[in-house]
Image (cartoon, rainbow, N blue to C red):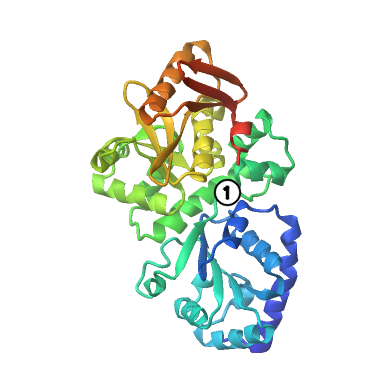
Amino acid sequence: MILKSDLKILIDSHKNSSELINSYINRELVDQILNEKSELIIITGLKRTGKKSVLYQLKNHYSNAAFYVNFRHPGFYGFDQNDFFKLDEIIESTESKILLLDGITIMEGWQEYIRQKLDEGFRVIFTTSNAGVLNNEKGRSLTGRYISRVIAPLSYDEFCAYHSLERDESSVLDYMAKGGFFVPETNRDEFLGQLFDDIVVREIGLTNGIRDLRAFKRLSLHLLRHVGEMITANQLKNILGIKTTTTVVDYLNFLETGFLMYYVPKFSYSLRKQLVNPRKVYVADTGFVSTATFNIAEKSDQLLENLVFLYLKSKFTELFYFSEDGYCDFIGFGKDQAKIAVQVCATLEQDKLEQELNGLLEAMDFFGFKEGTLVTLNQTDTFIRDDKTVHVVPFHQFATQK
């Protein structure tokens, strides 16, 4: 239990803290949420990606029309289900009809409370790091009433804005090494290493009831060291000594639903072939790779490919790689239609040129594209073959396209 007077003081202190909005950059997700019509929006994603800052910015936009509560504040220790009616009285006194709730899912009875507020005509936006909060019986009572939006670490554009950097090769290399998490500059690698461990073990492993956490962490680190490479569950089972392929498949799924790892399948019109062919693995933030790799300079191709993946993931509903006679890194789909073909090569050299172009041109021919893109670290060029044009662009230009 908590006194209503103490609860009011606590919430008033949140009003002051929301002024910290001025210390944050504008997140791209904010505009998306402002344009949504749903009565219930869930902001989820990895920890330390800025979920709180999004709520701050929404509060700043809505002003007095929104009521903000940070349930993660230590002052809420002792708050229980019976205290929600006191919170209701405070909300009623403000006449706000939009609720911004940070971390409410740690409170007992949060599902019933949100359902009640929706029935009363409120719009509710809340944050959680647990992707499975709506999978239990009580959470499923909100099915059909919400949309979910995932906040990722800073995009390249946001990273440059946050650190006041020019869009050039230098900032790309900086972004590639540091990543987009809000972590201290001092001991960044150590901090990111601990964050990765916390996400794997606590946020994903324990949440999903994984018993062999050592094997799960071993698999996670292996994927981290092999971003941009092909994987199969059977291959991973043999390499890592995990007992069954089914266990590996479960682990891979947990890492993806936990927003840490992503997998790109080979393009095929057959769903079965998509499932049986090797997939390529990517990580949510390349900053993690620097904590697990001795020399990231040797992985420039894979890391740049990972950055391109993260950018394309934010723009297209589905991504595939294309592999026939040649190979193309990404085919982006939107509304069940192929929209773009992208090849990635950090440094385009003469001995690589034909291989990279031929793979891209084959994909362009297959999907009927007249134009394709080859992304590099710092090179610009144009190649024309018959009626097809390949634009060679550096990542800092490619990733700032709207």
Tell me which residue sits at (50%, 40%) in the image. Answer: 312
Relative to 206, is 284 above or below? above
| Residue 179: image location, x then y, percent | 59, 42
Tell me which residue sits at (51%, 67%) in the image. Answer: 38
Q: Which residue is more in the foreground, 145 or 107?
A: 145
The residue carrying mark 1 is 153
Report which quarter residue 206 is drawn in. bottom left
Extreme-top residue of the structure = 350
Name the amino acid type tagged 1: Pro
Relative to 11, is 164 above or below? above
Asked whether residue 150 appears in the rendered view, the answer is yes
Relative to 124, is 262 above or below? above
Residue 144 located left or right of residue 15: left
Tell me which residue sits at (33%, 57%) in the image. Answer: 211
Q: Which residue is more in the foreground, 214 or 24?
A: 24
Say which quadrant the N terminus sits in: bottom right
SS class of the residue under badge 1?
A: loop
| Residue 296: image location, x then y, percent | 55, 30
Say which quadrant the C terminus sits in: top right
Q: How many marks?
A: 1
Report which quarter residue 321 is drawn in. top left
Q: Which residue is more in the foreground, 227 or 68?
A: 68
Question: Is the residue marked by circle 1 packed among few (<14), some (14-19), or many (20+) residues within 10 Å?
Answer: many
Tell me which residue sits at (38%, 25%) in the image. Answer: 365
| Residue 24: image location, x then y, percent | 71, 55
| Residue 94: image location, x then y, percent | 68, 83
Asked whether residue 108 appears in the rendered view, the answer is no
